[in-house]
Image (spheres, rainbow, N blue to C red):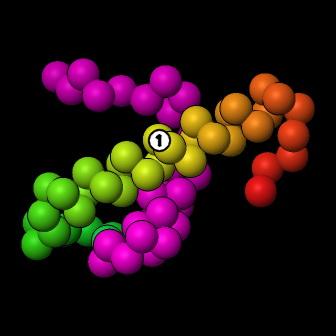
């Protein structure tokens, strides 16, 4: 049984798209399907940058600013 459940399952497609956009931005060759050829550092950088961008977006929203 997986513990890695989504808080909002309906957001899965949007999060997947976001992941590929971030990977492209930072130059990680992420592709749909198997990515076992990528290093843990590459995969970690995608996740870390996703979190950074989500926090920045939330901070802007809380401050009443429009997203950039």
Q: Is residue 64 left or right of residue 43?
A: right
Q: Which residue is mark 1?
A: 51
Residue 19 falls within the magenta-colored stretch: yes
In the image, which residues are magenta? 1-29
Which residue: 13% across, 64% down? 39
Q: Is residue 33 above or below residue 54?
A: below
Residue at 37 percent across and 76 percent down: it is 27
Q: Is residue 13 visible?
A: no
Is 61 on the left-hand or right-hand side of 17?
right
- Residue 61: % across, % down: 79, 33
Rendering coords of residue 47 (x, y %): 36, 48
- Name the residue at 43% across, 29% down: 6
* Residue under the image location 51 percent in, 33 percent down: 9
Picture coordinates of residue 63 (x, y %)?
82, 29
Give the quadrant of residue 19: bottom left
Query: Which SS class for mark 1?
Result: helix
In this view, 60 is above or below 62:
below
């Amino acid at each position: 049984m997986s513990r890695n459940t989504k808080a909002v399952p309906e957001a899965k497609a949007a999060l997947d798209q976001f992941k590929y956009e971030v990977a492209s931005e930072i130059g990680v060759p992420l592709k749909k399907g198997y990515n076992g050829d990528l290093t843990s550092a590459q995969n970690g950088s995608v996740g870390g940058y996703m979190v950074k961008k989500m926090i920045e977006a939330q901070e802007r929203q809380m401050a009443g600013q429009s997203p950039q």
